[in-house]
Image: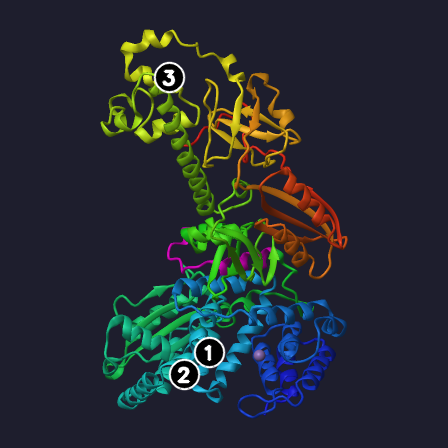
Amino acid sequence: MLRFEDILEEVERFLPRFDEDMLRRAYVLSAHSHRGQLRSSGEPYLIHPLNVAMILAQMHLDEVSIATGLLHDVLEDTPVTRERLEELFGKEVAHLVDGVTKIGKFEYKSKEAQQAETFRKMLLATTDDIRVILVKLADRLHNMRTLEHLPEPKRRAVAAETLEIYAPLANRLGIGRMKGELEDLSFKFLYPEEWRALNTAIDERMKASSASMERVRMQLSQEMEAAGVRAEVTGRVKRLWSMRQKLIRQAIPIDQLYDVLAFRVIVESREECYKALGVVHQAWRPVPGRFKDYIAMPKANLYQSLHTSVVGEGSLAFEVQIRTRDMDAVAEQGIAAHWKYKEGKLDPRLDEKRVAFLRQILETTREVKDPREFLSSLKLDLFPDEVYTFSPRGEVFAFPRGATPVDFAYRIHTDVGHRCVGARLNGRLVPLKTPLQNGDRIEILTSPVAQPSRDWLTFVVTSRARNKIKAFIHSAEKDRAIEVGKRLLERELKKSGRRLAKLLDTKAFDPHLAELGAARTDDLLADIGFGKLVPKFVVQKLFPAEEEAGAEGKPEKASGLRAVVRKILPFGGSGIRVKGDNDLLVALAECCKPVPGDDVIGYITRGRGVSVHASACPNVKSLLVDPGREIEVEWESVKDHSFTVDMEILTEDRKGMLARITKVISDAESNIQSIDARAMKDGNAVITATLTTPDRKHLDRLLIAIRGVPGVTQVRRKFHTHRPAVLPGPGAGTGPEK
Ligand code: MN
């Protein structure tokens, strides 16, 4: 059984001075807190952290990493807290153990390759210290080495996850040895039959060939010596998983498996690498197409080496890898080899540029063949601007930094976006504009009657969400405008005894569309509804003979805009009826959402009809600098119509506050379209809600009722100040998009 002293001995070998006391204390705490716990094998649990620490020591990591290895399971499995770890071992160890615990909770469920890549990137993005990943890899390696103790289904799941997530991660970090071992162990547990067959085939192949591994190794050594190249030669049987992949790739049956041996020649300099290659090619016949120069063109994980395959005695083919000692360290230890030791201490932050550079390499998704492409991908990744999040089903989604639950909702499905009313991040209700963080689990709350809000455009960051919201708003507005346009045109036509339905049936508008600047009849009707085209003008275009008769009517002048619009209702309301010569589309302003009973002012927008604001709306003043645009409006008395209002409620941050307020609102028979709660630093909370109300009277009663809830300190209707993206001011000239 592995002892703590073995680990100390291993560390002494590469770190002449180190904090032995800290490691000893970490060991004591780990032994104490895991006391009585057993592994599936029946052995004491402590075996596991000891082995993880040993793997980290063998990777030549610093004592902080090794202490983290000893303590990596105490937060998850024992009563020890993060605060306690910080007291005993300092911020760094506590931070690393916490990081390992955090990523241990991410569950990988998907079977898709795309998801695996995103999941790996998420693991990398979740931590600010790469040592967290290295400890996690060591943890996984030991668990894989002891996997036979787990029951069969669990075993397969862990092996599959290792193959899809952790082995590629080790590869990305350039830790070749760990990648190889993780793959072979996964292979053994995932495809046991296949593994056994391949293993047997290799044994037989070795027996059949006259030349043993040792003889080839000796001969390679001698050839090098004779040519004056100082080299260290080692041999091994190739990794089973990589052999299996090759058999599949090249569609070869097992019995035709030939190069099962691989030799490594370690030399002193780059020049000697090429010299050694010449020696190998002179002594044995190279297999065409198998030479690779990763020295001139390093792999994305910085791996450098010359690879060649040659055919020896008895047609035994073998692979030779030639590299310098430094290159070998990079190949075997990966990222750890890039770090410098200063005064016997490894501090990844000593050389931030180097670490930043490495991080980028880690994040490079593909192995890049072309060195220029390699460089450009490095540059791209220099801006780590993505966040990785989970759906409730465990799927991982990457987003640009700053993305919000609304972006997430639209990624799931357009309808989820359109119907989204709220979001839970990690189980907690949050405002829809909350920026997502790495590892967040997001649940979208939807309602069948909800609709996208124009306001969302001010905070969504993905173009998908932006486009879907815009398209929805546009098409909804256009639908309403077409309806209004129809009615306005209908009325104009009536004056000359014509019927719109008939003209539409006979496609009477078609010959005039281009002239009127519309592509289809619907566009023409929408233009009329939006107030861009005057119905009378359209009728005159269609029936020019009546132009004179038309001229007898009242002239269309800008002053006419001051006519009174008597009755207003929101679009799509049952009876929108507009009086006066200037028939314009009327909409309640989104910023103040007036309700019947409010004093209102109409404002003629460019291309979007009349916008009706509450007189109390803070935007009114700035909108009406242009006096020609003001228009008088009045409420029509209506029944059974509901209007939406935004409300802001300031409360003490008490438990159950939201529930009590929700109850008062529903008791008042008001529907909640969305509600968000946000705790403030001062111990208060702000609740914002969008509710329905039939009129001002009802709303005033509701405000009083909410004010009466214990803990509520303030209630008010919320008026939004204009931002250009929400509602254009005069002169912004944003008509509906075509
Ligand atoms: Mn563990």
Mark 1, other Cα within 10 Å: few <14 / some 14–19 / many ≥20:
many
**Residue 634 shown left or right of residue 537 in the figure:** right
Answer with mark 3 or mark 1, whichever residue precedes in sequence: 1
Q: Which mark is residue 189?
A: 2
The residue closer to the viewer here, 459 or 381, is: 459
Give the residue at mark 3.
536
Residue 553 in percent (x, y) is at 40, 9
Query: Is the CB atom of the residue marked by disc 1 within 8 angstroms of ligand 1's nearest atom?
Result: no
Q: Amino acid at mark 2?
A: Phe
* Badge 1 vs badge 2, beta-carbon distance below 8 Å: yes
Give residue 668's position: percent from left, percent from top. Answer: 63, 50
Task: From the viewer's perspective, tell me whether residue 275 is left or right of residue 248.
Answer: right
Q: Percent position (x, y) of residue 293?
A: 37, 63
The residue that mark 1 highlights is: 158
107 or 249: which is nearer to us? 107
Q: Looking at the figure, which quarter contains the C terminus?
A: top left
Taking the spot 50% from the left edge, 52% from the top edge, the residue there is 420
Residue 303 can be seen in this image = yes
* Quadrant of the rendered image holding ligand 1: bottom right
Distance CA(mark 1)–CA(mark 2): 9 Å
Q: Is the stretch drawn in magenta largely helix, strand or loop?
A: helix
Marks 2 and 3, the one that precedes in the sequence: 2
Viewer-nearest residue: 22 or 518: 518
Label 2 and label 3: CA atoms lie apart by: 80 Å
Local packing at callout 3 (Cα closer than 10 Å; few below 14, some 14-19, many 20+) is some
The range drawn in magenta is 353-372
Compared with 563, 452 (above or below) is below
